[in-house]
Image (spheres, helix red, strand yellow):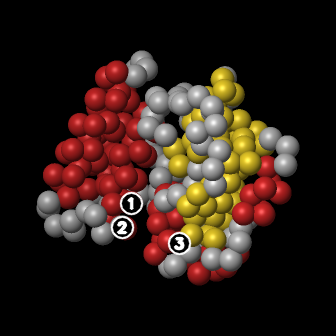
Amino acid sequence: MLLLNDDAFVEPGTIAQMVSAATLNVAAVGCKVRLWEDAARLWAAGECFPRGKYPVDNGEFDDSREIRYAVGCCILMTRPALEAVGLLDGEMFAVHEEKDWCYRARAAGFRIVYNPMAAVNHKVGSSFTTAGSAAYHYLFVRNQLLFWRHSDNLPMNWRWINHAWWLWRQEIGFIRHNGGAKLRRAWGATWGVVDYGRGRFGPPPETF
């Protein structure tokens, strides 16, 4: 099964390349993801690069390799893995859901691989109303906490607040130095922590 965002445009031969990499015991195949506005730079090479850091596609990322997860804007998921692991977690709705699924697939004994011969061009941020919207930051923070819980990296008692505080500070720091509408976006990140704490998952609030 191929998952493809409506803001990702497939380069010729990409699907065939991804299928060819889906060998025995592979759960998912990722590809190069180029920036739509600057195809010489990469948003992801299987896995995402840190936000705001888009390296030049100069040959450094031309080797096939095993990865932790494949970004969901274009990911080929194999039938054996889907049957063993199930679908994406609907509680996440969007953001980190592919990372969570790949973690579950790896825990079940599957591999996640990157094929550099496959590539898409991606209009980063078009899945939300604006790049870096309040809804994005809400989902980024809430779902990161949920992913940590699924992967046993988040305490189930009150100590989860320490992790949430660290994550919230990191997100607020990113917002301060990137983009506009900072107050609204910071509110989204803050509400993401609150909703994780009270167990509200699924789509973000309509107010975002």
Q: Amino acid at mark 1?
A: Phe
Query: Can residue 22 be spotted in the picture?
Result: yes
Q: Amino acid at mark 3?
A: Ala
Crowd around label 1: few <14 · some 14–19 · many ≥20 (10 Å): many
Does 58 sit above or below residue 194?
above
* Residue annotated with mark 1: 147
- Residue at 26% across, 56% down: 197
The image position of residue 78, as x and y in percent, is 69, 70
Crowd around label 3: few <14 · some 14–19 · many ≥20 (10 Å): many
Q: Earlier in the sequence, mark 2 or mark 3?
A: 3
- Residue at 21% across, 65% down: 155
* Residue annotated with mark 3: 105
- Residue at 60% across, 42% down: 61
The image position of residue 75, as x and y in percent, is 66, 55
* Residue annotated with mark 2: 151
Q: Amino acid at mark 2?
A: Ser
